Image (cartoon, rainbow, N blue to C red):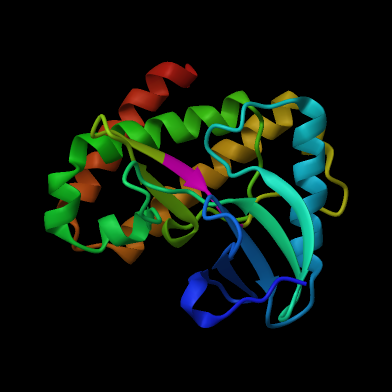
Amino acid sequence: MINLDKSRLVGKGLHREVYRHPENNNLCIKVVVHGNADESRREKEYYRLLEKRRIVWGMIPRYHGDVETNLGPGSVFDLVLDYNGAVSKTLGYYLSSNERTREYYSCLSNALDLLKHYLLQHRIITMTLKPKNIVCQRMASGKFRLFVVDNIGNSDFIPICNYSSYLAKKKILRKWQHFEHRMLDAYELNHALHKMLTTTHSHSKHHDGN
């Protein structure tokens, strides 16, 4: 049994809370606190599929199995940390301020482009992409690496996209387009973000051959 307390809370969503692992600072534990465990179960099933495909775990945290905690069953994942050991902040944090977005403009633009191509390359499907579910890992080089830390998986009743490269790519591109629109709506006054997405979109079209 692992004991968790609020001092180790690093994030929370609608149904789950995320705690820093008390025995390993490089790991975190996700615990269902509201609703049922369907989302968590679907996520773990999808992770097992990715493990079978032997993907590169470059921009999603690796899943390390389940544990019992004082708050109920928990799922153990890599915890995304900055180069200095601090827990990485969400993309939403960097986009919530015009000043921060301008300061890290180049890093964020490059990181978004790399994340999109990573998802396409490894056919990683997400249910919904949101700035609060993506964290920005600051590296010693000054660059950012983005990680999708929640809503990973395919909720389709018949998940054909899990086994078709063509359909998976179409779905990922559609989800990414919705993600861009969601960011523009949420941060409509962030002019640096609008410029960034226009530039990134043009660059991506060249790479995707659209």
Residue lying at 53% horizontally and 50% vertically, measured from the top left: 26
Residue 19 location (% of width, % of height)? 56, 68
Left or right side of 159 for 81: left
28 magenta-colored: no
Task: Examine the residues drawn in magenta and state their main secondary structure.
Answer: strand
Residue 150 location (% of width, % of height)? 59, 57
The magenta stretch is 146-150
Choose between 28 and 107: the one closer to the eye.
28
Residue lying at 53% horizontally and 29% vertically, measured from the top left: 118
Q: Is residue 155 visible?
A: no
Quadrant (top left, top right, bottom left, bottom right) of the N terminus: bottom right
Left or right side of 55 for 203: left
Residue lying at 64% horizontally and 39% vertically, measured from the top left: 171
Residue 24 location (% of width, % of height)? 58, 54
Q: Residue furthest front?
A: 23
Residue 20 occupies quadrant? bottom right
Q: How many marks?
A: 0
